[in-house]
Amino acid sequence: MSSAAPDFSHVQAWVFDLDNTLYPASCRLFDQMHVKMGEYVMSHFNVDFPEAKRIQRELFLRHGTTLRGLMVEHGHAPEGFLEQVHDIDYSSVPHNPRLLAALERLPGRKIVFTNGTSKHARNVMERLGVADAFHGVFDIVDSDHIPKPAPAPYAKFLREHGVNPATGAFFEDIANNLQVPHDLGMKTVLVLSDNEEDVKDWQGDRNSRWVDHVTHDLAGFLSELDFGD
């Protein structure tokens, strides 16, 4: 693994996670979503908030998302959960012309691959001002509600978007979500917050073999890539 900007001149498909990757963790959207998840679990399990948070975390750790755990272990339908969890205030997400400029200079296609919904992705991208830079979104519905890091969503994503992993790059804030892309032959970049307090234990080991590069500044990392132009 190296912190220096590498040669990405072969890359023609740029794949980005959404939450805490395209926007900084300091926006605290996840904090809002975690509260919404806790409220959902409270109401459906008739427990207090601390117990709901415990259940939520255990489901997340076992299944990759709380939703998947609710579906697999408790038979919950996904629609109500997704609607409630993404009913949040997006005003903390800043317009980011620096990120837009960095994305626009990348050759090839830019695609969002998220465990959230396409509506949530659009809301975030519109706030950032980068929606027009992207060619598509692959969301949790597209992945049949199977979240990263399970292998099946990656295979479906590659197939449906016609991405050759040998010419792809994957950007994520969770290290374990980079293992499958790396093993398929994609370049992998772990995007972390400038504030170490925002880097959570569940985000995994930045020194994992499947993390090719680490950055605390996505726009800066992309801007420094050399395409020989």
Image (tube, rainbow, N blue to C red):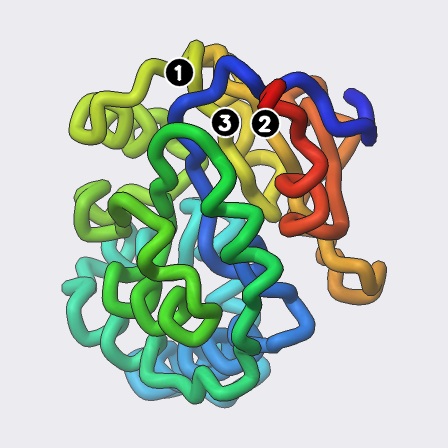
The structure residue drawn at horizontal position 50% and vertical position 57%, both measured from the top left corner, is 100
**Distance in Å between CA atoms under marks 2 and 3:** 6 Å
Q: Quadrant of residue 92?
A: bottom right
Badge 1 amino acid: Pro
Q: Assign the C terminus to one quadrant of the image.
A: top right
Amino acid beneath label 3: Ala
- Taking 143 as reference, is 22 above or below it? below
Label located before the other in sequence (1 or 2): 1
Q: Is residue 130 above or below residue 51?
A: above
Q: Nearer the viewer, residue 137 or 181?
A: 137
The local crowd at label 1, few if under 14, some if 14 to 19, many if 20 or more residues have their Cα within 10 Å, is some
Residue 190, image quadrant: top right
Which residue does the image show at 40% across and 85% down from the upper left?
Answer: 88
Q: Is residue 51 visible?
A: no
Whether residue 37 sits left or right of residue 120 in the image: it is right
Kindly check if marks 2 and 3 are in contact, taking CB atoms under 8 A apart as contact.
Answer: yes
Secondary structure, mark 3, is: strand
